Image: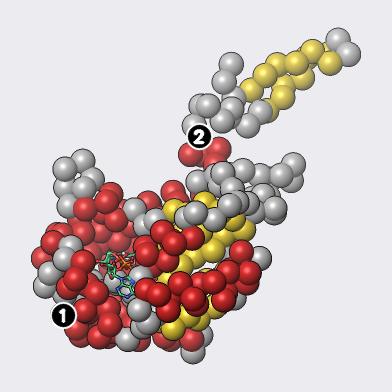
Amino acid sequence: MLFSAAVRVCGRLRLVIQRPPARVCPVMSRLFHSDSQGNSVKDKAKSTICVEGNIASGKTSCLEYFSNTANLEVLTEPVAKWRNVQGHNPLGLMYTDPTRWGLTLQTYVQLTMLDVHTRPSVAPVKMMERSIHSAKYIFVENLYKSAKMPEVDYVVLSEWFNWITKNIDLSVDLIVYLRTSPETCYQRLKMRCREEERLIPLDYLHAIHELYEEWLVKQSSFPVPAPVLVIDADKNMEEMIQHYEEHRGKILAA
Ligand SMILES: Nc1ncnc2c1ncn2[C@@H]1O[C@H](COP(=O)(O)OP(=O)(O)O)[C@@H](O)[C@H]1O
Ligand SMILES: Cc1cn([C@H]2C[C@H](O)[C@@H](COP(=O)(O)O)O2)c(=O)[nH]c1=O
């Protein structure tokens, strides 16, 4: 009997409804981890830090730097999955034809980000690259605002996002915003040479930058899910390491 158990109590038969055992469906068990009242709960002893910033602003490098820290687990953005899902490349398709493939990519980004947010942490502090929030507030918003995403696609993605954030605990304790100029990102993007991104124009990085500024600095566009630590990331790697060391205490105390 999978979901229920019949128990004999004081001679009477009572039906006890049980939660599905974790081994039956680990994802469901993860998403709906709840207390005795059925409220979604999070292990309060653990905290989540999201490193945010424009494309090629230095997020992965930042996570790499912190990856040697005790009691901290880093989770990089699942870009590899966006470039290859069962032999398909939704990231590449989106850059080729955003109107046709924007919804496809962003649906998959939302799913994979949900997976990262809800993955049980093996350390007290989880540091992740971007978040389900920035996928929606920056990238989906940009596609829609630039008239590259049809309204129906935007509405469907928004309904999914609203349901997820209302029903699943995705709480974040600190956002580290690596603030760069779009020009710096453009140079770094060219240096990194990711095939799908070779045609990204500087204007695109300007648009993403503005959306980040409105969200995390002016705090005028969408809800900000946690306090924001802004780090000037236009600096070279050596100076960035100094910044990281200056802020290490604040970051790890999140
Ligand atoms: N502070 C920095 N100065 C110069 N180059 C950098 C710096 N940080 C990252 N890079 C380089 O820029 C490129 C993009 O960095 P990356 O960490 O992958 O950015 P993101 O993860 O934000 O896209 C990489 O080639 C990386 O080595
Ligand atoms: C979250 C998110 C990302 N993308 C794109 C933007 C970039 O081309 C890559 C991520 O690379 P980065 O160097 O880590 O910034 O994915 C997107 O199109 N939509 C999204 O929601």
Say which of marks 1 and 2 sits in front.
1
Q: Is residue 97 visible?
A: no
- Quadrant of the snapshot with the C terminus: bottom right
- Residue type for callout 1: Pro
For the point 84% across and 16% down, which residue is it? 9
Return the residue at label 1: 201
Relative side of 186 to 70, left or right:
left
- For the question of whether residue 54 can be seen, the reply is yes
On the rendering, which quadrant does ligand 2 occupy? bottom left
Crowd class of label 1 (few under 14; some 14 to 19; many from 20; radius 10 Å) = few
The colour mode here is secondary structure
Residue 91 in the image: x percent, y percent?
A: 21, 59
Location of residue 87 (image quadrant): top left
Tell me the amino acid under the disc marked 2. Answer: Pro
Q: CA distance from mark 1 to mark 2?
A: 42 Å
> In this picture, is 159 found above or below 227?
above
Q: Say which label, 1 or 2, has the lower sequence index.
A: 2
Above or below residue 87? Residue 173 is below
What numbered label is drawn on residue 94?
none
| Viewer-side residue, 127 vs 113 | 127
Q: Is residue 253 left or right of residue 217?
A: right
Residue 247: % across, % down: 57, 74
Q: Residue at x 21, y 48 (%)?
A: 84
Q: Residue 69 appears at what percent x and percent y?
A: 54, 56
Is 215 or 146 nearer to us in this picture?
A: 215
The residue where tag 2 is placed is: 26
Neighbourhood count class around disc 2 (C-alpha, 10 Å): few under 14, some 14–19, many 20 upward: few
> Residue 38: x and y, percent?
69, 45
